[in-house]
Amino acid sequence: MTTPRCHFNARLWQHPLLLLKFCLLTCTILGQVCSWAQSPLEVGPNTTIFFADKLNALVLEDKAGTATLEDVRKRLTEFQPADTVEAIKPKSHYWVAQRLVNRLGEDREIVVNAFVNKEGIHWLRYQHFVIDANGQAKELNGPYSTHVPLHMNDINPSVFTMDTSLSRNPVFTLPKNEEVLLLSRLNSNSTFTATNFNLQFYDRATYLELRKLGLYIEGLFAGIILALVMSSCSSLFFKRDIVSVIYSTWLFLGFLQIIMLPIQDGQRLFELAFDQQPSTIGIMPSHVFWMGLISYLQLVMYFGFGRAFLGTQRYFPRFHFFSNLFIAFEGLRFVIAYFFEHEISPALFRWPSHVFFICMLTATIYCAVMRLKQGLRTAKFSIVFATSVLPLWFLSLMSMEGVHLLKDWTDSNLTLLLSDTYVLQAIAILLGALVSHFSIHARTRGIEKKLSATLVAQREAAENQTKLLEATVEERTRELQTQHKALNAAHKEVLDSVNYASRLQRGQLPRSVRIDNRFESFAAIWEPRDTIGGDLWWISSSTQQGPFVLAVADCTGHGVPGAMLSLLVSNSLERIYAQDTTENPAQALLSLDHYVRHGLNQDRLDSESNDGCDAVILRIDPPSRCIEFASAKIGLIQVTSQGECIRHGVQRCSLGYVETLQEAQQPQLQIISYSPQDLFVIVTDGLIDQIGSHNGKRSAYGHRRLEAVLKKHHAMDAAQIAKHIQEDFAQWQGKEPRRDDVTALVFKL
């Protein structure tokens, strides 16, 4: 019997290669058996509400992410202990196997929490399967399961049900004295990289009572900030300054962030308004993206509020520039984190932001201290807020890095909350909102006090100024009364002088003795724009035999200057025709040009004036029915007995000015024949150029309108025609101011 054994041993030692293969196969089988020799996690009377299996979890890496539940169940022997996995890779999927056994003597509902832990976001995507003792697999509810998570309208409060699937969370029943296998498919992210494979479990029935505290606190925080938002919005309606706008926006973003924070087991308040569907924005789940975006905007608005409140752009331009860099850096970091799968290590991705943030807080405290020294008393609120945020931020940072400073405290609901990094963030937001609220109100009270003091000072100054003004006004009133009396006296004197000058000017116009027996009918319109004017009309003496002379002149200006110049023109005409009327009108206009220029000394180089007149002279010979006519810018209109209007041409020259008339500019003599009942009209430019309105359109009176009146009434005598001209002209002028002196002579020979 010993021979075969010795023979076998001899053969085995004779083949070392066969011996090596045998050892390797034995080790492999033993390793697989040992790796799957998984001890279940016992759930018994001493198990805490929150528990996790940190010793027995087994892991299978699925690099391609294509493995299904059936594939994994066939590869259970390939699972390895969790502590043998070197590092969690963001691009890989992991299957975690955990066994649980119920030692409580009754069925219990267990909730699996893979999304968050005390450090923050844990596994972004997860899918859980429970395999009972009979080998039956069941997929649990969750954002990335095939079952759509619970909607708020899926629950009918009037229908009694014990369906445990009516939950947003992955819930399964752990039967008494039975063992179940939980297979979890997990996927991390390059930004929020999971640190371990420890999934948190908690007893659903017991935790429903415990989590009320978290909801109460979260609702309390949200309610306080919502009240502050409404208060700030009502104040913003009246103030509308940049500080209030930024503060209100920051408060609203803080309210949104609190309801989005996954305190304890989910974004509970956020879920009331939004269903968490398995959709993505960028590379993140939608609810994680919105939480990150609101967090970034809230951070930006916080420092924006601090900058506006402290006036950093004016007083601390370097810090203002530094804060712009911080905002740009955080924006770039947000884009990279939420839209790109990067290869940056979690520590390298987080710590520059932490250092930047602590520098910003420190610089804010420095700016607030300096502004307090400069006299801005409300800057103390910025100091209080920044210094109170520092410890909360430090605790949150340590919690995110896995260091829980409160773990040695006595276990209670409060310590359970304070050990959550998101609870610390919510407290920091609330604290900032309250301190900022007090700072805004203190700033408003300070402004109101300054404004009140300013108003009091202004009122006192106004009262003193009013008294001074009243005394000054009284004194000035007495002076003005004295001056007014003097002005009235001077005005009366001037007015009397002008009225007297008007009588003198009217007195130099031809008397009736020079008109009678020379015209069949004659009428004159002479209306100075002011009391006196520069227009005149003149008729030669009645004592002279033969033809008589009629002249009309429009002197430069109106009022007193025009009247003085018209006197010179009238005297010059008397001088020209002093002996007889033999001088023809063209030569008479040249003589008038000479007399006016020499009379005003405008023929000298040192002359101080440059004035003259426009004129027309007619030498009328009734027996021969002939008129000699010469004109300088003033025309003659002839209307025959048949109603035909003839406008006799004029020479475009003026008389008496500094520049002497050239030969081509001199007035030319014209011979006009007429018949009985022919009508003659001479008008100055004051009538033709007067602005009026017709059918709402403003324009000058013009020759056409005058000729239309003459044609219509040419059969009447001169007085009636003149009356019609005056009426039509007055209607045309309306409310327009008179522009110039108006003169019109209407006569029949």
Image: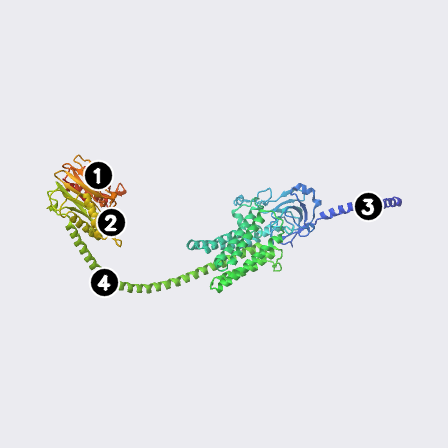
Inspect the image, locate mark 2, and give the three-letter code of the amino acid beneath it.
Tyr
Residue picked out by circle 1? 647
- Specify whether 645 is left or right of 326: left
SS of the residue at dot 1?
A: strand
Inspect the image, locate mark 4, and give the three-letter code of the amino acid beneath it.
Thr
How far, Cα to Cα, is label 2 from label 4?
A: 44 Å
- Specify whether 397 is left or right of 542: right
Residue picked out by circle 2? 657
Residue extending furthest toward the top:
642
Residue picked out by circle 4? 482
SS of the residue at dot 3?
A: helix
How far, Cα to Cα, is label 1 from label 2?
A: 26 Å
- Specify whether 665 is left or right of 289: left
Assess whether mark 3 and mark 4 are in contact (beta carbons under 8 angstroms): no
Inspect the image, locate mark 3, and give the three-letter code of the amino acid beneath it.
Leu
SS of the residue at dot 2?
A: loop
How far, Cα to Cα, is label 2 from label 3?
A: 143 Å
User: Which dot marks residue 19?
Assistant: 3
Residue extending furthest toward the front:
663
How far, Cα to Cα, is label 4 from label 3?
A: 140 Å
- Using a 10 Å C-alpha cutoff, classify the residue at mark 2 as few (fewer than 14 neighbours), some (14 to 19) or many (20 or more): many
Question: Percent x, y for residue 709?
Answer: 20, 39
Residue 90 seen in this snapshot: yes
In the picture, which quadrant includes the C terminus?
top left
- Using a 10 Å C-alpha cutoff, classify the residue at mark 3 as few (fewer than 14 neighbours), some (14 to 19) or many (20 or more): few
